[in-house]
Structure formats: C-alpha cells, structure tokens
Image: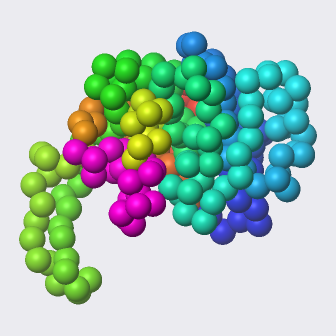
Amino acid sequence: MKADKPKQFLELQGRPVLDHSIELLLKVQQLDSLVIVINKEYRSLDFIQAAVAADPRIKFADPGAERQDSVCNGLAEVPDQCTLVAVHDAARPLVTLDEIHRCLCDGAEHGAAVLAVPMKATVKESEDGEFVSQTLQRSKLWEIQTPQVVKPPLLREGFKRVAEENWEVTDDVSIVELMGEPVKLTLGEYENFKLTTPEDMVIAEQVLAGRK
C-alpha cells in the first residue's frame, strides 16, 4: 500500500478503513458478538475505544502467526450460543449488509458459505512461473471474497484437523473443503474488493461517494 501505517487504519472518506467495517458489521441482524482480531497496541485508538464504549458486543482477540491462527484465536472468543460465525477481512469495507445476510442464510442452510463472484479474466496455470502449462476453464472459476460463514462446531473441528494433520489452508472455507463438507457459493458483488494498492483507495472513495 506504500503507506506509513497498516491499511486498516488509512483514511477512507475521513475515517479509518476499519471503522467502516465495524460500523457495518454491528448492523448485521441477530449479531451476538463482533470479535476484532487486532494487536493490543492498536486497541487504544480513539475510534476503536469509542466503538467499544458504544457497543458491548465488541470483543478482542490476539492475531496469530498465520491467518488460520488469527481466525482460531477469534473463534475462541465466540460465545457458545452462536450458531454461525462469519470471518471478514477488515480491508474489505465495501461489502453490503445484503451480501452478508445472504451469505449467512446460505451458511445456515448448508453449514458453510462464502461470498464469491465469477472470474472475469482468463486464468492460466504455470508450473515453473515462466511458461504456460494450461488455460483454466473460466466458466468454472470464482473469485473468493469475505465474509466466509461456517457453523462454529464445523470450524472448530476443522482447526483441530489442521493441527493434527498439518493441513495448509489459504482461507477459512478451505478447511471445510478439506473435511469433505460442502461450501455454498453466495453470489456477491465486484465492489467488495480487498484494499491492496493505493489505486484501490481511490476507487473505494468513489464507490462510497456513489452509494451516498
């Protein structure tokens, strides 16, 4: 991102990126808890303290060495009465409540669900990083987003298997896939992209301005 701070704290329409995500997620229907996986040094930031003071549902968990470790730590803070857990990237502040609710509904019905959009670009596979080995069939490819929704018992069992069998996973529903359980694709929107480059911040500003 070429910035002097983590991208979650960059300003988007005058507010930190993370603040946009917190505000949105607290509006999710029947939300019991919002667990923010974040280093202790950032928990004292003014906007985070203001959110905590205004809503007791906010909790914290420590990040881990890998994404799966961070998610596991966050899952440990989820109350037992919760029937679904949704894992969301703080750097995706453009997701909509409608997308989240549809993904939650699919997760409740199928056990696991993930927001995704059909791939627009042609994708080629390379074994050595220098030459094309094959062209993948675009009609079968989906770009995965977040939130990723899983029933807590299924995700807890998945993390147990990850530790026991040394699985390598790139995202949360990959664990469910490796267990042989179904993962429902919930059709999302292309605007729900992950902020990665400075240009993404410009586009995000335009998207939010257009929604207003």
Q: Quadrant of the N terminus?
A: bottom right
- The one nearer the camera, 121 or 212, is 121
Relative to residue 119, is residue 165 depicted above or below? Answer: below
Q: Quadrant of the C terminus?
A: top right
The residue range painted magenta reads 159-180
Magenta-span inclusion, residue 15: no
Identify the coloring: rainbow
Q: Residue furthest front?
A: 164
- The one nearer the camera, 79 or 196, is 79
The answer to whether 87 appears left or right of 79 in the picture is: left
The answer to whether 168 appears left or right of 14 in the picture is: left
Instruction: Residue 210: name its quadrant.
Output: top right
Instruction: Residue 20: name its quadrant.
Output: top right
The answer to whether 155 appears left or right of 14 in the picture is: left
Tell me the residue at 79%/21% (across/down). Answer: 55
Q: Position of residue 62 (x, y in %)?
A: 71, 52
Relative to residue 202, is residue 117 depicted above or below? Answer: above
Tell me the residue at 33%/28% (across/down). Answer: 111
Relative to residue 138, is residue 49 depicted above or below? Answer: above
Magenta-span inclusion, residue 176: yes
Answer whether residue 60 is visible to the viewer in this image. Answer: yes
Q: Position of residue 206 (x, y in %)?
A: 57, 38
Relative to residue 115, is residue 161 depicted above or below? Answer: below
The answer to whether 5 appears left or right of 73 in the picture is: right
Q: Position of residue 39 (x, y in %)?
A: 76, 55
Answer whether residue 100 is visible to the viewer in this image. Answer: no
Tell me the residue at 62%/41% (across/down). Answer: 76
Q: Position of residue 187 (x, y in %)?
A: 30, 30
Tell me the residue at 73%/24% (across/down). Answer: 57
Q: Main secondary structure of the magenta part?
A: helix
